[in-house]
Image (cartoon, rainbow, N blue to C red):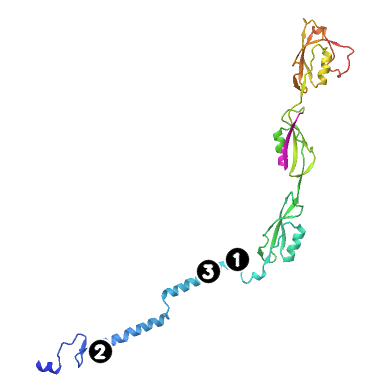
């Protein structure tokens, strides 16, 4: 044992998996050396060559971005085809047509290569007949050559004739006139027609006006009040004539056989003198004497005509 140690042979235990060299240091086994030196550099090289230096997340980002760009371009072309690069140069700007006559609008559209169309017509108080009130598409919009432009034309001011509303209630007459486009104001005045009812218009019925227009509705507030004349002491024939001149009528007649006045003289009346009545209202009288003693003119005798043969009541 002493000899082997001194010669350096087997001086120590050889580590597992290696051999000892002459200097006593350990050396890896040949098989392990080949494995270590042969695998690590080659695997790193193969990974680098397969990816070309790009990380996986970078590749995914590029793919997603490309898909987004393609989708955006497709949607833009689909939703706004008039603005595609191939058609931008061929679009036409719609001109302003509102306020022009229909013929002027046709000429303006023909100049830029667009078609003319009429959508509708309507009355307008401030636009002459045939004037353009509206258009579609609106001015400034870009359209393809030959596209139609529809216009709304004016029929001009609307004209209506005033109807005859006499006899209608004030409310009914106002509704009739309002539906025709007239602006209605009411004015009350005395009239023989029942109070609260229309008896005319200003201007009168049949007048043609451009609507909207102002019309005054005349509404009755009843007949004017008339002061009842004092009939006391007058003969009944005189009383009848006086009442007729006042626009009143003779009402019921009663008799007073005990009166000291001459027969046929009026000794009482209702309403009394000075009271206000409407035109045509009656006045009741009381006459002195008995009916057979009183002479009175015939009821159908014209006012102011004397009776040659007075009728005995």
Furthest residue in direction front, as rendered = 274
Asked whether residue 50 is drawn in magenta, I would say no
* Left or right of 295 on screen, residue 180: left
Up/down of 142 relative to 188, above or below = below
Answer whether labels 3 and 2 touch (C-beta < 8 Å). Answer: no
What residue is disc 1 on?
80
Q: Could you tell which of marks 3 and 2 lies nearer the N-terminus? A: 2
Which of these two is toward me, 46 or 247?
247
Answer few, some or many: residues within 10 Å of disc 3's Cα (few below 14, many 20 plus, some between 14 and 19): few
Asked whether residue 189 is drawn in magenta, I would say yes
* Left or right of 238 on screen, residue 60: left
Separation of disc 1 and disc 2 at Cα?
74 Å
Q: How far from the left and from the top, in percent, is residue 232?
A: 79, 12
Answer few, some or many: residues within 10 Å of disc 2's Cα (few below 14, many 20 plus, some between 14 and 19): few
- Which residue is pictured at 78% across the width and 43% down the height? 209
Q: Secondary structure at mark 2?
A: helix
- In which quadrant of the rendered view does residue 6 lie? bottom left
Q: Could you tell which of marks 1 and 3 lies nearer the N-terminus? A: 3
What residue is disc 3 on?
71
Q: Which stretch is magenta?
A: 176-190
Which of these two is toward me, 45 or 190?
190
Q: How far from the left and from the top, in percent, is residue 154?
A: 74, 52
Q: Could you tell which of marks 1 and 2 lies nearer the N-terminus? A: 2
What residue is disc 2 on?
30
Q: Secondary structure at mark 3?
A: helix
Q: How far from the left and from the top, in percent, is residue 12?
A: 15, 88
Which of these two is toward me, 189 or 254?
189
Q: Quadrant of the N terminus?
A: bottom left
Furthest residue in direction left, as rendered = 2
């Amino acid at each position: 044992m002493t000899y082997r140690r001194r010669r350096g042979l087997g001086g120590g235990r050889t580590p597992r998996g290696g051999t000892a060299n002459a200097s006593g240091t350990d050396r890896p086994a040949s098989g392990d050396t080949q494995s270590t030196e042969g695998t690590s550099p080659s695997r790193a090289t193969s990974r680098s060559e397969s990816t070309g230096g790009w990380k996986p997340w970078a590749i995914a980002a590029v793919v997603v971005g490309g898909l987004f760009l393609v989708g955006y371009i497709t949607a833009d072309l689909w939703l706004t085809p008039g603005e595609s690069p191939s058609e931008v140069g061929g679009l036409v700007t719609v001109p302003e047509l509102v306020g022009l006559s229909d013929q002027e609008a046709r000429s303006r559209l023909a100049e830029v290569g667009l078609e003319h169309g009429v959508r509708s017509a309507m009355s307008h108080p401030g636009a002459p007949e045939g004037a353009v009130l509206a258009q579609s598409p609106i001015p400034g919009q870009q359209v393809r050559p030959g596209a139609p432009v529809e216009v709304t034309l004016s029929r001009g001011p609307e004209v209506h004739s005033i109807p005859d509303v006499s006899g209608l209630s004030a409310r009914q007459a106002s509704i009739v006139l309002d539906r025709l486009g007239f602006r209605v104001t009411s004015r009350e005045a005395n009239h023989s027609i029942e109070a609260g009812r229309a008896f005319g218009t200003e201007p009168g019925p049949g007048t043609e006006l451009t609507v909207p227009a102002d019309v005054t509705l005349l509404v009755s507030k009843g007949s004017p009040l008339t002061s009842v004349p004092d009939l006391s002491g007058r003969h009944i024939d005189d009383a009848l004539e006086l009442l007729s001149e006042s626009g009143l009528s003779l009402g019921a007649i009663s008799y007073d056989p005990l009166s000291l006045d001459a027969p046929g003289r009026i000794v009482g009346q209702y309403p009394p003198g000075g009271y206000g009545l409407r035109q045509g209202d009656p006045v009741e009288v009381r006459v002195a004497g008995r009916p057979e003693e009183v002479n009175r003119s015939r009821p159908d005798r014209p006012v102011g005509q004397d009776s040659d043969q007075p009728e005995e009541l």
